[in-house]
Amino acid sequence: MKPLNLITGETVGILLFFIGLYGLMTKKTIVKTIMSMSIMQAGIYLFYITINYSPDTVPPIGQSREAAFADPVPSALMITAIVIGIGVTAIGLTMFMHYKQQHGITHWSRNRNQQGSEH
Amino acid sequence: MLYLLVIGPILAGILSIIFIKNDTRLFIILSQVLLFILSIAVFLEVRTRGIIYSYMSNLPDSIAITLMADNISSMFILLTSTIFLMMVIYSYKKDFFTSQFGFLLLVLQGLVSALFLSTDLFNLFIMLEVSTVTVSILIMINKEKQAIYDGMIYFFVNVIGTSFLLFGIGMIYRTTGLLDMRAVQEVLPQLDSPAAVYLPFALMMTTLSLKTAVVPLFSWLPKAHGTPSAPPVVSALLSGLFIKTGVYMFIRFTAMFGPVINIREVFLVIGVITSVFGFVMALGQNDIKMILAYSTVSQIGLIMIGLNMGSDIAFWGSLFHVFSHAIFKSTLFLAAGQVYEQYGTRDIRFIRGLFKTMPLTAIAILLGILGVTGAPLFNGSISKYMISYGSYRPTIQFALNLINLGTITYFLKFGTILLGKDSRTEEAKKVKPDLISEILVFVMGIFIFLTGIFGQFTIDVLFDFQVEIFSGEYFEKGLVYVLMIIAGLGFYNGVIKKGGFLDRVSHIEMTFNAIITSMTGFFIFITAYLYFFV
């Protein structure tokens, strides 16, 4: 097998997923957490849109050529997932911005009690 | 009819926030009452006519997005609407019940109902994601520093956990070309080798274990459920009901993979470890909310033990434990909220003499404690009895008794708030408890007792499962319970009061990175187990 054949959407997607996971495991900055989360999700999107795809297929609508249809379901799912991903990233960033402006903290702390309130 | 359960609360929430300018509380309570009636209707129809399906846009089965109400999910739906109704009545006179809060509660109800009804995998992913957002906003609704930090941890951990599920769904779709759980369950046995679904199984189980908060993925739970400034209603909802979505999905997903993968014993062991860990952590806490939160971890472990024993009676027993845990844990959380309002502190060492100051709440707490520790004739005892009936292996019996001893011990610690002398100044005592919530907490406490004493009947109605409970063996367990209390008293006075080791253990906390690392570790463990030991 040529090395080029290994570089498909699926393998790259899986790789991106674990790169994102590595970032989440090691980075203590909250912004980097959000970025790693986005990388992880990008990996999943890439994985989805390349599964069950073969080059000689055509889109299911608006085609005159007689050929096998490409599976539209993964792309439809990913449109939804991308929208949700945007929402989640935006909410995460909003929480982080509020937290930083109010309390000036940009890192995940080591101990909850050190910076907790007096309860 | 099933769509109404999902879309109804969300629509009511939107209407309430758009059209009602001042006070949305009565409207929300009214819509809750209507939803409660609807869920009873669905429940009765499932019992009399069997499973209800409803297909989106009338497409054929296994292609359409399907909502399904069967024996189990109709019970969960009934539980959902009951708990939500109780919550809105409790918070009627509280100042945190703003129109935004009501809106979020209604949206959450719709999402939770959808989680219990949907059989479409991608639909489940979306509901999990959106409910994560809703819950994290509810946790940080007071915008207090600690609450925002806890809410952020909850939010990020759960979003990352859910992306594991999404990845798993992608792999399932690649292998089978299907997204409907029932359809996937049918085609999985036709696979050449079960190894094709090992990876998606491990990915999905990581998410579900995170959602059910088993060891080692539990550490977001005490943070989220025990957030000091979150309203008691939020804690009660999360601990009583929302955590059960994870349990429910665990049941569905293990059934889906059932034909090809069966690693019950792993989850049995995980359940035991979770349960023991939960009570060890609970023993060292001094915050009443944190004790209750770790108690949830412990009880979820017990539910996992029952689900994975592989015996019918233990399975239904742990479903009944889901029900009874929902009732007594939300009672205890609401009562804890009342106590905080009255005393202005959550520290268990400064609250005394509850029977004198707020007798109704105190009785409710007492009933709740009797329920959770499994006193004879209370609902907790019946579910625990059924779970212990599922296996005669001595190790399991020993573990169950140990867990019960632990539960009794930390609730003895919790119970110290009931007695003693109220040491506050006269001025501090003047806070008047609000009567509606006081009565509601009391009614819920009575409900714990009623579902216990009519336990056989309740199980028959809820699950359509006939079981003989009040036998000689059951009352022998009652004797064991009394012995356990004596042992617990000794244990409490001799060991726990001195603090020391347990105190240090209970303050161990995981950082955010450690939580994610343990999630990855769990995923690698399940994958490795499947490839090398199955």
Image (cartoon, rainbow, N blue to C red):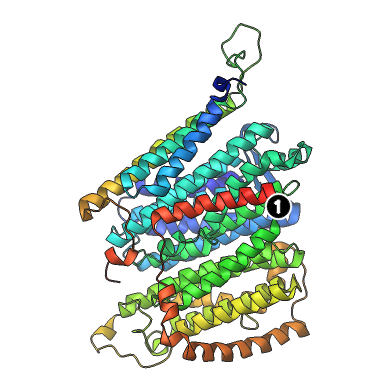
Return the x and y of residue B156 as percentages of the image width and height.
41, 49
- Residue farthest toward the top in the current orientation of the protein: A64
Q: Residue at x 58, y 81 (%)?
A: B405
Quarter of image, res B96: bottom left
Q: Residue B334: image x %, image y %? A: 44, 71
Q: Residue at x 70, y 65 (%)?
A: B316
Q: Is residue B1 visible?
A: no
Q: Nearer the viewer, residue B18 or B170?
A: B170
Image: A32 above or below B351: above
Number of on-image labels:
1
Residue B462 vs B515, above or below: the answer is below
- In this orientation, does residue B347 appear? yes
Q: Position of residue B504 (x, y in %)?
A: 40, 75
- Left of B146 or right of it: where is A58? right
Does residue B98 appear to the left or right of B451 in the view shown?
left
Q: Residue at x 66, y 79 (%)?
A: B453
User: Horizontal and vertical percent for residue B423?
Assistant: 30, 90
- In the picture, residue A36 is in which quadrant? top left
Q: Label 1 neighbourhood size at 10 Å, few (<14), some (14-19), many (20+)?
A: few
Q: Between residues B126 and B515, which one lies in front from this camera angle? A: B515
In this picture, is B133 found above or below B141?
above
Residue at 53%, 70% in the rendered image: B277
**Circle 1 sits on which residue?**
B533
Note whether A13 is above or below B391 in the view shown.
Answer: above
Q: Amino acid at mark 1?
A: Phe
Local SS, label 1:
helix
Parent chain of label 1: B
